[in-house]
Image (cartoon, helix red, strand yellow):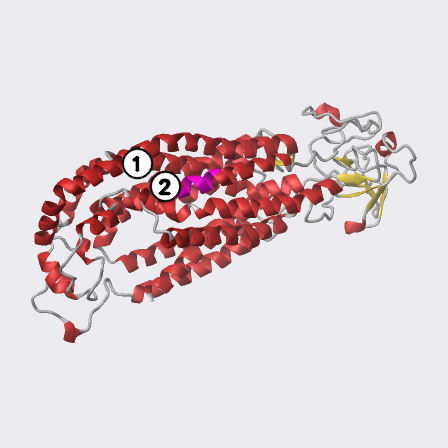
Amino acid sequence: MFVAALSFAYFANALSGSYMKSTITQLERRFDIPSYLIGIIDGSFEMGNLLVIAFVSYFGAKFHRPKIIAIGCILMSFGTFLIAMPHFIIGRYKIETSVRWSVNSTNNLSPCPASSESTRTVTFTPGDARWVGAWWLGYLIAGTITLMSAVPFWFLPKSLPMPVDKHDTSCTPEHTRFIKDSPTMEHKFRPEEPANFHQMAKKFVPTLRSLLGNPVYITFLCVTIIQFNSLIGMVTYKPKYIEQHYGQSTSKANFVMGMINIPAVALGIFSGGVVMKKFKLGIMGAAKFAFGTSLLGYFLSLFFFAMGCENTNVAGITVSYTGVEGLSYQEQSLFSDCNLGCLCSRREWDPVCGENGITYVSPCLAGCTASSGSGRNMVFDNCRCVALVDTQPSNLTATLGQCPRRDSCDKIFPYFLALSVLSSFIISLGGTPGFMLLVRCIKPELKSLALGIYMLATRTLAGIPAPIYFGAIIDTTCLKWGNKMCGGRGACRIYNTSAYRIVYLGLTLGLRTVSFLLCISGFALLKRHIKREEKNAQTNGSGELESLRKEENSSIDCEQFIPALDCNSDRESHL
């Protein structure tokens, strides 16, 4: 029952965390904020963990752990509900638009105003850079599920009970509360274990010093932190990368991540554990396997650089009004002779697709002077700027939304998905062996603290900063920023696709390159560590075994352990 309840709690936890990453572009558009600020919001999840993680990892085993987990689930559900609250507080979502009511007509919309006129919100599609869905609904669902996951833990005991008729009066009350033959008893109840909170606190600093003096652990921690920076930054902005680079909708990008990538990662982690068990990999074998799979995944990821799409043709930004390619970050380039007759604003992003295949920032900047139809079927007519590229102009029309990407980009996307699944699976193969390497290179009495420091360090030095600086670097590739309704710069409307690909993939793989360099020194330290442990086992093995037997004599009698223990196998399991 505990495993079932904990699995459900993990599911609720993962649901809230992954849903946050899936709504990144929605939050950017809804609140008109840049990517680096979204990174701060995403990283704040880890900031909350920092408040309690060290305390729980060291002292949590002494208290009622199921109830502590229940309290954590309740707090997380409350935080998830809070994320959705702005939707109910700040009112309806309003978009920027350059389309205005005509002064002389109540039925027509004027894309080319001759004077200041009232604006109107025009219907737009999910593919538009301003589209925002019901982002808040998922947080309400995730919060409810997380709250439900707390219920079972309130009814679980502090420890596993044992039938009364099997209680041994010679054992302590702590022993009788646990089921017999528990393989973890030998380390749970040692005679020298501190009896109160004050003594445990006094022992914390020496224990921490002993842990941080392990060079293998420190090297592993540094490698993991760097690789987690790469992983978290990549995963956080991968749906956004798919949207911006391959022109996919938000829903499709998240569907791809959830239905294809995540199962591949789960299968990889499970398969890695099967391989480790089948081939009985030792500590060095696990290290080599984890390094080999990570390196192979790294080389496969290099092919992502070749799976690029060209920038969308946007007049005045990626191409000139005559169709000549060339990037421009100057707002003045949005104006041309074909649209000077209108009082066009350069602030709005209200894209239309000309019949010549070029996107224009707004109907006004396309030189359109009339419109027909309504809603998604609205068509803008007499667009003078379209004639500059269209050698055989007909009606000079433009439709709502950006022009679709070229067919070549659509053909590349399936190959991107296939390579993404393959590389994710291969890299995940090393997940279980890598974690076992962490566990085996630590003394048994330090493992709980080692895992706590491991989680603390990865959250502090990877979970918090990675989304922030990844987002800040991605912001540097923006070509056209939106504007907030109350003034100031809003969310990015269009990126330099090539630059986005280079900085996103380059930063991801660059961090992993640094981690591989650290692995070289890690292997040397690990080899030295194994030789030292083998030497100690040969010289002190019999004495350590006798000491361990005396120390745990009462536990062996009460728990009916097998009296004959093999020193070498016991030491190997500790490693």
Tell me residue 538's x, y (percent). Answer: 16, 42
**Residue 265 appearing in the image:** yes
Please give the label number shown on residue 287: 2
Tell me residue 149's x, y (percent). Answer: 40, 61
Amino acid at the residue labelled 2: Ala
Please give the label number shown on residue 228: none
Q: Nearer the viewer, residue 293 or 133?
A: 293
In the image, residue 330 above or below residue 566: above
**Stretch of the chain drawn in magenta:** 289-295
Residue picked out by circle 1? 526
**Residue at position x 68%, y 40% from top?**
96
Amino acid at the residue labelled 1: Leu
**Residue 129 appearing in the image:** no
- Please report contact status of discs 2 and 1: CB closer than 8 Å, yes or no: yes
**Residue at position x 53%, y 35% from top?**
471
Occupied quadrant, residue 456: top left
**Residue at position x 41%, y 43% from top?**
289
Q: Residues within 10 Å of mark 2 (few under 14, many from 20)?
A: many
Quadrant that contains the C terminus: top left
Occupied quadrant, residue 164: bottom left
Tell me residue 472's x, y (percent). Answer: 52, 31
Q: Nearer the viewer, residue 452 or 421?
A: 421
**Residue at position x 50%, y 41% from top?**
297
Occupied quadrant, residue 226: top left
